[in-house]
Image: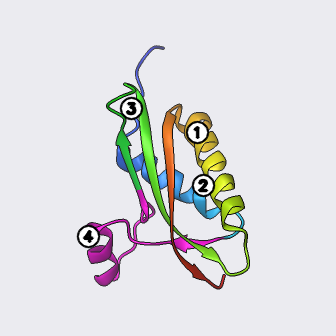
């Protein structure tokens, strides 16, 4: 049987957010923009909160991903960031069949986990 599987940017963002939560030292995700902030105010939470996925115009077929994270107090931030980037790139490739051309991690806070 032949066919084509398409993964939407929203589905990919949810998948990558779940993978990011598995990284030791990541306490949570922060709102990535106005939409995430409004959703949080309304009391709903989406799995993709804190993740923005876009197609990369410079690399057709690849995506860029931005993560807005809160890290645990006392962790080495560069280590957490590197682990997160590796984990989400692996998850994108193995679980969705998608390659990430760029992963940007924005540490927006430090908290207790």
What numbered label is drawn on residue 6? 3
In primary-sequence order, the first of circles 2 and 4 is 2
Q: Residue furthest top?
A: 2
Discs 3/2, front: 2
**Do the residues bearing badges 3 and 2 touch, measured as CB atoms within 8 Å?**
no
Q: Residue at x 44, y 51 (%)?
A: 13
Look at the picture and state if 11 lies above or below 27. Answer: above
- Residue at which label 1 appears: 95
Discs 4/1, front: 4
Q: Magenta segment range? A: 26-51
Q: Residue at x 52, y 37 (%)?
A: 96
Q: Give neighbour class at mark 3: few <14, some 14-19, many 20+ (Cα, 10 Å).
A: few
Identify the element where label 1 is drawn: helix
Gap in angstroms between the C-alphas marked 3 and 1: 13 Å
Gap in angstroms between the C-alphas marked 3 and 2: 20 Å
Q: Position of residue 94 (x, y in %)?
A: 62, 35
Q: Residue at x 60, y 55 (%)?
A: 19
What numbered label is drawn on residue 34? 4
**Do the residues bearing badges 1 and 2 touch, measured as CB atoms within 8 Å?**
yes
Identify the element where label 3 is drawn: loop
- Residue at which label 2 appears: 19
Quadrant in the rendering for residue 70 = bottom right
Q: Give neighbour class at mark 2: few <14, some 14-19, many 20+ (Cα, 10 Å).
A: some
- How many marks on residues? 4
Quadrant in the rendering for residue 95 = top right
Q: Nearer the viewer, residue 78 or 71?
A: 78
Quadrant in the rendering for residue 8 = top left
Gap in angstroms between the C-alphas marked 4 and 1: 29 Å
Q: Position of residue 57 (x, y in %)?
A: 31, 31
In primary-sequence order, the first of circles 3 and 1 is 3
Discs 2/4, front: 4
């Amino acid at each position: 049987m032949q066919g084509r599987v398409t993964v939407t940017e929203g589905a990919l963002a949810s998948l990558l957010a779940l993978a990011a939560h598995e990284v030791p030292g990541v306490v949570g995700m922060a709102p990535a923009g106005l939409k995430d902030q409004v959703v949080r105010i309304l009391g709903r939470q989406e799995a993709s909160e804190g993740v923005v996925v876009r197609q990369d115009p410079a690399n057709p077929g690849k995506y860029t991903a931005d993560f807005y994270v809160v890290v645990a107090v006392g962790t080495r931030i560069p280590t957490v960031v590197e682990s997160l980037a590796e984990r989400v790139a692996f998850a994108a490739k193995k679980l969705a069949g998608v390659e990430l051309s760029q992963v940007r991690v924005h540490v927006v806070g430090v908290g207790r986990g």
